Structures are given as C-alpha cells and as structure tokens.
C-alpha cells in the first residue's frame, strides 16, 4: 500500500474524487493526509467528515514558507506519504518539500499548459478568444505551472460559452483525468 496526500485550498471537488476512487478495501493507494493552508475551506471539512487526517494551518502564523513547509514535511513523514497531489492548492511549493518529493508531486491545472498558467486560467482562455483549452496534469517544479506535463484533455470552447459553462466542462474533465493519471503512478510505487 502506498500513502499519498492531497493539498487543497478551496472547494475540494478534486479531493472528493480521490476519496471516492480510493474507497475499495483492496485499494493500493491510500489517501493518508489532507493538507490545507485554509483551515476553514470545504476541502478540510470534507476530509474530516470521512475521517482522513488533516493538517490545516494558517500561513500568517509562520515567519516564512520554509517554516510551515517544515511542519508539513513532518506530517507527511509521520503518515508515511510517498506522493503529493496538489488539487487547488493555491501556493507555490518551496524547496523544503520539492527536494525530498521531486517527481512525486503532481498538480492539476485548468488549461492546456504551457498556455494560461497561474490564476484564473479558464477566464484567461475565454478572454484570449482561443477555440481550444483543457486540463493538464503535470509534475511540480519551482515555477508557476511549469513542470513536465504528463497528460492533457482537450476541450473545445463554443462561441456561446460563459465562464460557468466552460468551467463546468473543465472541472468534469479534471475529475476524470487527475485520478486516472495519479492513482496508477501511486499504486506502482515501490517503497524502498
Ligand atoms: C481546479 O480547477 C484545479 O485545476 C485548480 O484549482 C481548482 C480546484 O478545484 N488548480 P477544487 O477545489 O478541487 O474543487
């Protein structure tokens, strides 16, 4: 069994999919920890509801990123976590976590990277007037959505699309793609 953590800052719909998809008693990927920089967010409430351990912290209580990432690292180690999935975690990951977890941190982003990195990727695509956007699952590095892409889903933008209609299709695609990419990688991990 390989343990993984989900990092989230908001609604937690991607987290919900990981909870659902790792429920089976013979599942080899175990969702061992949910980490959040927003203790009041729905993702944290969701994790607590299904009794998954959480580490929810207020970044303002720490002098810098290294300080809270040190605590996150201890929690990850205490729960034997091998993989991290960023699912709506709205912060850049620093070297305290990147160094020990290099090529074991994945992010899901709502655009066809390298197009439209950063915040409001769905709005950015709409405003740019492109006819195609999508979803990317990629490894995380120091940059903003710059790590190596593993898989993408393409989604056509219709002329009548609004932020809401497009976001609905993009989120549905994220919910399929992210567990489909991440869970086989997690399950196949040899623990040394
Ligand atoms: C998703 O669109 C994800 O791609 C982005 O943040 C959003 C998180 O949504 N990084 P949720 O919290 O999983 O519902």
Image (cartoon, rainbow, N blue to C red):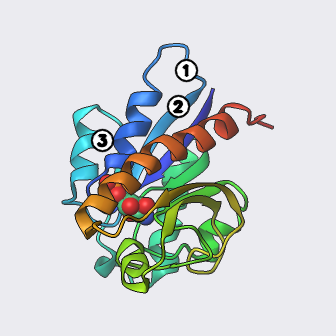
Q: Is residue 79 visible?
A: no
Q: Which mark is residue 49?
A: none
Separation of marks 3 and 1 at Cα, in angstroms: 18 Å
Q: Position of residue 19 (x, y in %)?
A: 39, 34
Label 2: which secondary element = strand
Which residue matches tag 2?
A: 30
From this viewpoint, is residue 183 visible? yes
> Whole-Å distance between the Cαs marked 3 and 2?
13 Å
Mark sitting earlier along the chain (3/1): 1
Asked if 191 appears above or below 178 in the picture, the reply is above
Q: Is residue 144 above or below residue 154?
A: below
Nearest the viewer among 22 and 77 is 22
Q: Residues within 10 Å of mark 1 (few under 14, many from 20)?
A: few
Residue hosting label 1 = 27
Side of 17 relative to 179 (left or right): left
Does mark 3's beta carbon lie closer than 8 Å to ligand 1? no
CB under 8 Å between discs 3 and 1: no
Q: Residue at x 22, y 35 (%)?
A: 49
Tell me the crowding category of disc 2: few under 14, some 14 to 19, or many 20 or more residues within 10 angstroms, Cα based: many
Q: Residue at x 53, y 51 (%)?
A: 76
Quarter the C terminus occupies:
top right
Q: Nearer the viewer, residue 127 or 12?
A: 127
- Left or right: 60, with 76 as reference point: left
Counting the numbered discs, the total is 3
Could you say where residue 78 lies in the image, as x and y percent from the top left? Answer: 53, 45
- Residue identifier under label 3: 47
């Amino acid at each position: 069994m390989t343990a993984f953590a989900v990092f989230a800052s908001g609604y937690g719909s991607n987290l919900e999919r990981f909870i659902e998809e790792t429920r089976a008693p013979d599942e080899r990927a175990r969702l061992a920890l949910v980490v959040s920089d927003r203790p009041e967010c729905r993702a944290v409430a969701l994790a607590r509801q299904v009794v998954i351990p959480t580490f929810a912290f207020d970044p303002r209580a720490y002098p810098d990123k290294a300080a809270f990432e040190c605590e996150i690292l201890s929690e990850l180690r205490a729960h034997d976590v091998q993989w991290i999935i960023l699912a709506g975690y709205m912060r850049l990951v620093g070297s305290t976590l990147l160094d020990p977890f290099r090529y074991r941190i994945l992010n899901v982003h709502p655009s066809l990277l390298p197009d439209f990195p950063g915040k409001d990727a769905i709005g950015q695509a709409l405003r740019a007037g492109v006819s195609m956007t999508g979803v990317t699952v990629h490894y995380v590095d120091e940059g903003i959505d710059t790590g190596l892409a593993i898989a993408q889903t393409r989604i056509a933008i219709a002329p009548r699309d609004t932020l809401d209609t497009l976001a609905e299709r993009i989120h549905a695609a994220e919910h399929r793609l992210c567990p489909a990419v991440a869970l086989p990688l997690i399950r196949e991990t040899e623990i040394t």
